[in-house]
Image (cartoon, rainbow, N blue to C red):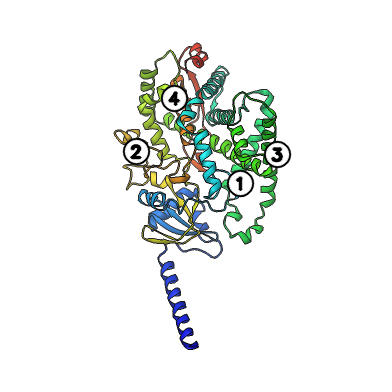
Amino acid sequence: MDLALAVSFGIFIALWGLWLLKARSNLPPSPWGLPLIGHLHLLAGMPPHKALQRMANKYGPIISLRLGMIPTVVISSPELAKEVFTTHDLNFASRPYMVFGEYFSYSSVGLVSSPHGKLWRNTRKLCTTELFTAQRIDSFSWVRREELSRALEGILKAHGNDKPVEVRKVASVFAFNITSRIVMSKRYFGDENVDADAMEFKELNDNVLELTINPCLSNLVPWYLRWLDWQIPRYKRIHAKQDKFLQKIVDEHKETTRKCKDFLDIMLDFFGAGTQGETYVKANLMEMLIGGTDTTSTASEWLIAVLMHDPRVMAKLREELDRVVGNTRMVQESDLPKLEYLQLVLKETLRRYPPGAIIMPHISSQASNVGGFHVPKGTTLLVNSWAIGMAPAVWENPTQFHPERFLGSSIDVKGQNFELLPFGSGRRKCPGMAMGLRAVELLVANLIHGFDWSFVPGTTPSMEDVFRSAIQLKIPLQAMASPRFPKDVYINQTSHL
């Protein structure tokens, strides 16, 4: 009896070992890695989205990597992106450990960074119903109108002083003030009495983004080795400053009476009073302020840059704006659906320079089969949306900027067309996409309609990009702006919009 049991157990172990060997041998193709660092050395010397594209060109559209000690699968084709975001969407709906979530989203309790579960579902439902519906987005048009007016005034002032316009800064202030006013009824940039708070947040924002884009040991090792990360004291110092800043906002908000509740009031009611509830509020507040600013400003800067470098496309868009809007007023939100060529230019810009060049990481909650390969439980998933947008098998002449490629096409950027995924797809796609796109379209349409743009004399700005929290111009775009219309068109634009 004992012998039979031992033989049975031995057979079971042997079969289990063979199954494991087969599963491991069926992992996606992988380059040779190194001990401890895995494949990190293959990401050196160029932006990660381009390094991953180079590997995909050699090994195929699905590859297996170890980033440090973290098992990772990288997807670089629309077919496989569709598979992971539809067939396996629930399995990949969670987030891996990230320094950003741990230290700057209060142990990953914000909507963007939180694991898939009850908290994430409740927060998503709250944001979807109270902030990101089409009706709610329309209701904030007056905020966008006022911030656009201030942006135009700033550009006119720069022209009057014969100074260049830093496009990213204009777009950042525009986007941040819209987000802060919608979420917490407070405008930060532009008013002298709050400039100190604005600059404090900018410093915090820059520090957080710097830490999220630089390699962090904590992101590359199992939980039991994170104590080795020498940057932890710095993470904690920045988080302490961040928490002080956000707690001040929450405390001031609770002491102020408003006729109508804003989203911060709604969050405070939803999550409840006390330390835990306010922690959830602060995490979401931080994610909204960073996400609502960075993506919008980056996309706006790219749009202006590509138009300045392509006179043909600029002239064609300008002709559409003059025809639809005329020369007696600025662009209104009601004009945007009529600006068909603007939509083509926007899609083409997001194809070439997607804000989420590498879509925010997902993690598998169970083992699965993707593209015929075994993906173990606990594997980090990266989708290289930039590589998909630049794939010759998907796009004809992908390096050429050609908005007309979208003529007659139903492809959009909302996450259902997997050859164009600037904001992700599935359950975890960018929740504020529609609100951000509205701001980008309104700002860029008015900047092109209202001003002639030229390079600073003696310069031809580079289109070289750099990978930060999004793909950005390595050198921020500075340009001279000359008004196309009499001053009263800009001054009176608020009454028309």
* Viewer-side residue, 24 vs 88: 88
Residue type at mark 4 is Ala
Q: Position of residue 351 (x, y in %)?
A: 40, 39
Q: Position of residue 167 (x, y in %)?
A: 52, 29
- Measured Cα–Cα span from mark 2 to mark 4: 21 Å
Residue under the point 58% across and 36% down: 289
Whether 442 is drawn above or below 269: the answer is above
Whether 293 is drawn above or below 419: the answer is above
- Measured Cα–Cα span from mark 2 to mark 3: 44 Å
Disc 2 secondary structure class: loop
Disc 4 secondary structure class: helix
Whether 15 is drawn above or below 452: the answer is below
Residue to which mark 3 is pinned: 244
**Residue 279 disc label:** none
Q: Position of residue 481 (x, y in %)?
A: 50, 22
Residue to which mark 4 is pinned: 445
